[in-house]
Structures are given as structure tokens and as C-alpha cells.
Image: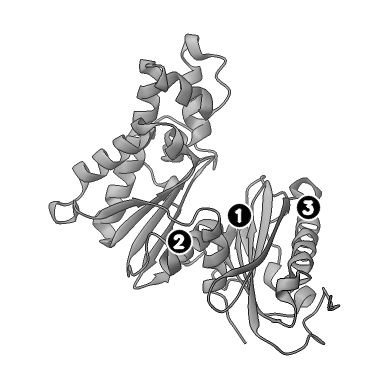
Amino acid sequence: MTTRTTTSSEGRAAGPAVRLGVDIGGTKTAVALFDERDAVLARATAATPAAEGAAAVVAGVRELAARVLAEPAAAGTRLSTIGVGTAGVVAPDGRTIAAATEALPGWAGTPLAALLEDALGAPTTLLGDVQAFLAGELAAGAALGARGAVAVMAGTGIGGAIAVEGAVLRGGHGAAGHIGHVPVAAAEGHRCPCGAWGHVEAVASGPAMTALLRREPAHAAARDLRAVSAAAADGDVAARTVLRRGGGALGAVLAGVVNTLDPDVVVLSGGVLDAGPWYEDALRAELAARALPLLRGTRVVRAALGADAVLLGAVSRAPTR
């Protein structure tokens, strides 16, 4: 097998260009090597060493990159670009992590693009993970062909992203699309994980709905959203009410976004959608009820690409050489 450097593209034989997509989350990091037609040549995944700090996370990306570049399918290729979708808020220039939660301690301020360019020798750009997810769905998924799109990812938190005229918006601080932190009446009196009060994430995320159900004496032992879903499937009124309330609150927020942006499509994703029909049905009903009459026919669809959306989206927006 051809031997190649894993720390720089210098010295690699000229050949077909390949692109490295990277997805950095609080628990898992994934990479994939794409050819010019967006086919995956090799992929690798490992646990994110979040507790060990930013340097360990970057080292983990380097190791995964070295692994896929050493695959037989990558023989004779040259790494032309790196695109990263990452947890946290990416600065508007696509170079640095502007802010992050404790899911990745010490991540804020990391000059990730420069570090990966030094390590791997290819131009690098960063997107927030949900921004990259939407870019992927625009490139080859549920939003293919759309000029305007809104994406929401409902899981441990509520993430979002917005595209206008085909471009995924970063915003003045890199935080465009943070739908989970839009205030909504159903969340009044509830504290959001960000520290503010009344944000939709405080009633519509998996942990939030689990905590709300635990207030019921019969469900004080509920550990996670699976317990909420199981209770709802068994006909429990309180569990179904919690799911409907969360879905309805997010639907109200999305109606405001649709009324403001007039997108071609709204793309839904995230583990909360698998909690049964009550959440998604309430979301769709509330969105339709609150949307302008002209916009009530806006398409609302499930995501199509799964975990590859972030990887593909990140490389689709990355610079090439």
C-alpha cells in the first residue's frame, strides 16, 4: 500500500482531488472522504475526547483524517479541502469557535481552521453543525433545489439553520438560525439551558420534556425521552400532553420564521421526532394554524441524508484549491 504523510499534503502524488468532511459533536466525531461526485470513499468515527479539552479534540480529528487518507480508496489522491461542521457557534469568518457549551469544555476560542490547515495542509472552513446539516440537505437531500430553507434539529437541544437565496446564513456573530432560543408563550416561566427564560428549547427538547413529565408523581422516575415516548404509546395522557406541548411550541416558533422568511421548505430532523406522532403532529398543526394564509402550503419534510448531511454539507461549502 502506498505510504503517505498524515500531517501535510506536501509530498503526496498529484491525483484526483478528494475532500474531507468532519462532524464534531460533544460525544462523537466522524470524518468522511468524498470524491468530486460526492461519493464517500472512506469514513471513520470515534468518541470525542471532550473532557480532555480542545487540543485532544483536534488531535482526534487528525487521527481520524490520517485513518481515512490511508485507506486503499484514497491511494493516489490529493486532499483539496476540509469542511467542518461542529458543535458550538462558529465565528462569521468560518475560522474560529466563537462560543460553545460545556459539552465541549474549552472549545470556545479554538482557531480550529488554522490548526487543521497546519496539520493536514488543505484549506479549511467551519460551519455550525446544524448549518452544515442544512447545507447537506440543500446539496443532495430534502431541500435539494430550494433557494430558501429552514432546518430544525430537535434532540438534546433545539438547533436550527436558515438558507436564503441558496446561501446558509452565518449571521453577524455566527449564530444565525438558533431557533431553539426564540421566546415562545408556551415556555414562559421555564429556564432554558442557555440561562435565559422562555426559550422554546425549555419545553421542546428531549431533556426538557422529560423533566416536565417528571413533575407528575406517577412519572417521577422517568429518566429520558424514551420513557416519555413509552408512556405516551401506552396511552398516558400526561406524556402525550408533554409531547404535544413541546411540538406545538416549536411549531409556533417555526410559523414565525416561515412568516418572516417565506422559505421553500422546512426540514425537520432529530431524535425527538421518533418519540411518536404527538410531537410532530402538534408541530405541523401549530405551524399551519399560525402561518400566513399564503404560506400554509409551505413544504414541511423530514431530513433525507441522516448523519451524512453534516459531513456533505461541510465539504459542499468549503474552499477548494
Residue 68 visible, this angle: yes
Q: CA distance from mark 1 to mark 2?
A: 14 Å
- Point out the frontmost of discs 1 and 2: 2
Q: Residue furthest bottom?
A: 14
The dot on residue 34 is none
Disc 1 element:
loop
Question: Quadrant of the image for the N terminus?
Answer: bottom right
Disc 2 element:
helix
Residue 67's place in the image compared with 286, above or below, is: below
Q: Residue at x 84, y 77 (%)?
A: 5
Residue that mark 1 sits on: 87
Task: Where is residue 31? Give x, y as percent.
Answer: 67, 62
Residue type beneath disc 3: Gly
Residue that mark 3 sits on: 53
Earlier residue among tags 3 and 1: 3
Residue type beneath disc 2: Leu
Q: CA distance from mark 3 to mark 1?
A: 14 Å
Q: Residue furthest left?
A: 293
Q: CA distance from mark 2 to mark 3?
A: 28 Å
- Point out the frontmost of discs 2 and 3: 2
Q: Is 261 displayed left or right of 227 in the figure?
A: left
Q: Residue at x 48, y 16 (%)?
A: 215
Earlier residue among tags 2 and 3: 3
Question: Quadrant of the image for the C terminus?
Answer: bottom right
Residue 57's place in the image compared with 145, above or below, is: above
Residue that mark 2 sits on: 134
Residue 197 visible, this angle: no
Mark 2, other Cα within 10 Å: few <14 / some 14–19 / many ≥20? many
